[in-house]
Amino acid sequence: EDQVTQSPEALRLQEGESSSLNCSYTVSGLRGLFWYRQDPGKGPEFLFTLYSAGEEKEKERLKATLTKKESFLHITAPKPEDSATYLCAVQAGGGSTLGRLYFGRGTQLTVWP
Amino acid sequence: GAVVSQHPSWVICKSGTSVKIECRSLDFQATTMFWYRQFPKQSLMLMATSNEGSKATYEQGVEKDKFLINHASLTLSTLTVTSAHPEDSSFYICSARGPVWGEQFFGPGTRLTVL
């Protein structure tokens, strides 16, 4: 069964303290791995798509990387406005419903001044 | 670009009534839209996949007679919760598959409270 596991469940950082969030996955034929940011009471906001091992993408203080078994979301010198829940999702090939995403439970990030 | 809207953003209704939620892709055409449900501090649970002009595909355990989905155009999908009960209270989120293969863009969500 396809699975996505995110760790840690919650992370508290002081402003400027860099860290990484982990997303490990077991899927049949990865088609893509996606990172989203979700603020309380809102829908997920798209951040990155990664398609193959070794791929990296950056956006401001965020950098996403992908290996064959996991992805990391690195946050460099975070600010309080980076506080949110970060969701990882994978899209599998094979017999999966076309385009469906399998979501992890998310990492709730809190950055305090 | 790639904006998805939902309406209403929140709704309160009495038990036994039906509620319709609209999901629109504002600046792109979406042949496929998805409906999710999210409980507090939980991740998104896919309810169904909606394809324009055809019947929706429901995930196992989701009652298709209770959660009616209509994808009548390339920019609009609707979810109707029929005969709503308090246990249907939740945060409902739609997404639309974007022009780049694999990407999904999410709406802001609809908070449903059934009294």
Image: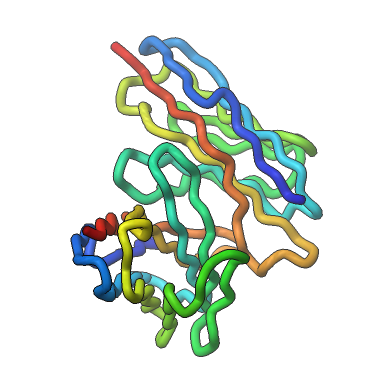
The quarter of the rendered structure image containing the C terminus of chain B is bottom left
x and y percentages locating residue B22 in the rendered image: 31, 72
The scheme the figure's colours follow is rainbow
Residue B107 visible in image: no
Q: Horizontally, is A43 left or right of B8 in the view?
A: right
Q: B60 or B101: which is nearer to us?
A: B60
Classify A3 as above or below B106: above
Classify B22 as above or below A65: below
User: Could you tell me which residue is drawn at 62 percent across and 51 percent down?
Assistant: A102
x and y percentages locating residue B111 in the rendered image: 28, 55
Classify B41 as above or below B104: above
- Image quarter of residue B61: bottom right
User: Could you tell me which residue is drawn at 66 percent across and 69 percent down?
Assistant: A98
Residue A47 visible in image: yes
The quarter of the rendered structure image containing the N terminus of chain B is bottom left
x and y percentages locating residue A82 in the rendered image: 37, 28
User: Could you tell me which residue is drawn at 37 percent across and 57 percent down?
Assistant: B87
Q: B107 or B43: which is nearer to us?
A: B43
Q: Horizontally, is A91 left or right of A30 in the view?
A: left
Callout count = 0
Q: A81 or B52: which is nearer to us?
A: B52
- Image quarter of residue B21: bottom left
Classify B2 as above or below A48: below
x and y percentages locating residue B35 in the rendered image: 46, 65
User: Could you tell me which residue is drawn at 32 percent across and 14 percent down?
Assistant: A112
